[in-house]
Image (spheres, coloured by chain):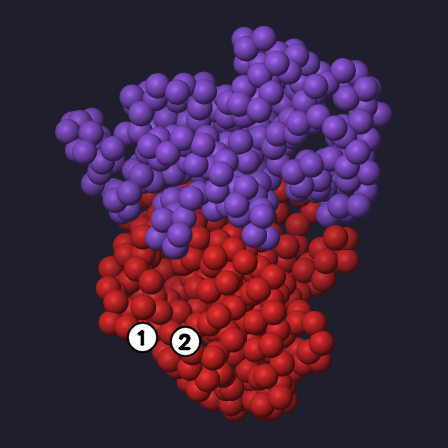
Chain colours: A red, B purple
Amino acid sequence: MHTASASAGDPGGTWVTRASLDTSGSTDKRLERRVVMSPLLGVLGGMGPAAANSFLASLVEHTPAGRDQDHIATIVYSDPETPDRSDAILAGGPSPVPAMRRGIEFLDRSGCDLIAIPCNTAHQWFDELAAAGSTPILHIVDAVLTRITHDAPQAGAVGILATDGTIHSGIYQRRLAASGHSVLDLTDLGADNPVMAGIRAVKAGELDHARAYLTKAAEMLVTRGAQGLVFGCTDVAAALGATVDGVDVPVWDSSEALAIACIDRIRPDRPDQALTAGEEARENR
Amino acid sequence: MHTASASAGDPGGTWVTRASLDTSGSTDKRLERRVVMSPLLGVLGGMGPAAANSFLASLVEHTPAGRDQDHIATIVYSDPETPDRSDAILAGGPSPVPAMRRGIEFLDRSGCDLIAIPCNTAHQWFDELAAAGSTPILHIVDAVLTRITHDAPQAGAVGILATDGTIHSGIYQRRLAASGHSVLDLTDLGADNPVMAGIRAVKAGELDHARAYLTKAAEMLVTRGAQGLVFGCTDVAAALGATVDGVDVPVWDSSEALAIACIDRIRPDRPDQALTAGEEARENR
């Protein structure tokens, strides 16, 4: 299967092997430029500057590997000048699409077999980005949905800690509703929304303040009825790690979910490998 | 200045601006492929899987930035199948040079203005890699030397915590001797060398064991007369962080030094910017 929009939730999807690429005339140009022979993961980073790093750390942690050579080959393209995604959605700021398209085209030309975009807000423009090249892009919300379905299939309402831009884009609401989950957020609080205050504190490097705001936001979402929480912004996980103190519902980090989905897609022969490897890495820490 | 081997320690080196690139006929092909307009840093990663991540984390931490868009554009190429560097040096294992050359050629073709290789052992083959393209490569030992000269110019003997392969390659000994420093290591201990035991423990994910071995190694080097310590392997910093408990000499992490040197080279207008930004980031943590 080699479509522009790959779904992490599709258990029937098989990996594009080198052999299948070799027989397709349309991929000749990509093969010519290809430098790595194993499946190659492209990452569109730079949104923000540390987002790709946490994604790559999850990728290393969850890849079952006994030695360096067992890890996944990657090309990471980060153009931090990409205009702010939330500004574009909420305030009519300059569009980030041309810069992101250049990145996708670069990864496509470089012979990547699969692309990940560790930025939730960027997925507002998923369809345009998927159309920018022939390399399939894994949708971050599909990756989260796969984790929710695995860990807590009965969860009704799920709380999302994300930028106003991501909430406003509707990417979580649409994809989670299709699987029977409702989505809770705090955007009705406007300027008092502790999620945005927390994300701004992370970007300013004030992690203690950030933790206080984001923990409060998590508690408020649970009070409103959330049966699970999604960290739908890399900055949230940067401040809180993988859990929220005092909150007793499952928590999913979208960036980690995306890494797990990429591993499962690239190594489809080993179901649940990424979860097991991640647990072992944590136990040894 | 646009030579194959850039030196981090060269204070007279100026950055290759876009304007100067535009007037050079030899760079036409690179410009054609170029997708990012600001200075673009290429990173040869994958040696080991987490090395590029810690380098990139240092790069973000030390870049003076008030917003996402102030950070440095990067392309990171990681081929984990690159054969083991130490094996090649010490045990006649397969050469990593062809895989590394493919990576350098890729970064060169992609229009990078400067290349960093966050792997000390790989610098054994620095001259061959620098000859693989026209993009200057910053030598990691020059970057360390710049930090030693800045922080402790009077340091005589410097202890190196690195793989046997790096020690055996002589890259530290040669470049530090030229600046009047001698180099101490523990390779004379053979199988009892706690540095290699510590590095193996990091690779196996056993960080507590790793810390114990590497702290012991640091203490032994200070007892032997080291007036400063260099973490000459990314795995060492991964276990110990930026300091060694109970050791009272300056410590330099080669990966962080390389990140600082890249920032100083890409933004030469702001001396000591990277050091100041890094200190501020730590205070806010």
Please, which chain is the residue tagged with disc 1 on? A
In terms of secondary structure, where does tag 2 sit?
Answer: helix
Badge 1: residue crowd in 10 Å (few <14, some 14–19, many ≥20): few
- Disc 2 marks a residue whose amino acid type is Asp
The location of residue B77, given as percent across then percent down, is 45, 42
In terms of secondary structure, where does tag 1 sit?
Answer: helix
Residue found 41% across the figure and 76% down from its top: A164
Indicate the quadrant containing the N terminus of chain A: top left, top right, bottom left or bottom right: bottom left
Question: Are discs 1 and 2 less than 8 Å apart at CB?
Answer: yes
Please, which chain is the residue tagged with disc 2 on? A
- Whether A240 is drawn above or below B17: the answer is below
The location of residue A193, given as percent across then percent down, is 48, 78
Residue in front for this viewpoint, B183 or B134: B183
Residue found 43% across the figure and 64% down from its top: A119
Residue in front for this viewpoint, B7 or B204: B7
Residue found 50% across the figure and 32% down from its top: B258
- Whether A233 is drawn above or below B236: the answer is below
Residue found 71% across the figure and 40% down from its top: B240
Residue in front for this viewpoint, A219 or A60: A219
Residue A118 bears which disc, if any? none
Residue marked by disc 1: A90
Residue marked by disc 2: A164
Exactly how many numbered labels are in the figure?
2
Question: Based on the displayed image, in which of its 4 quarters is residue B20 positioned?
Answer: top left
Horizontal side of residue B208 vs B19, given as left or right: right
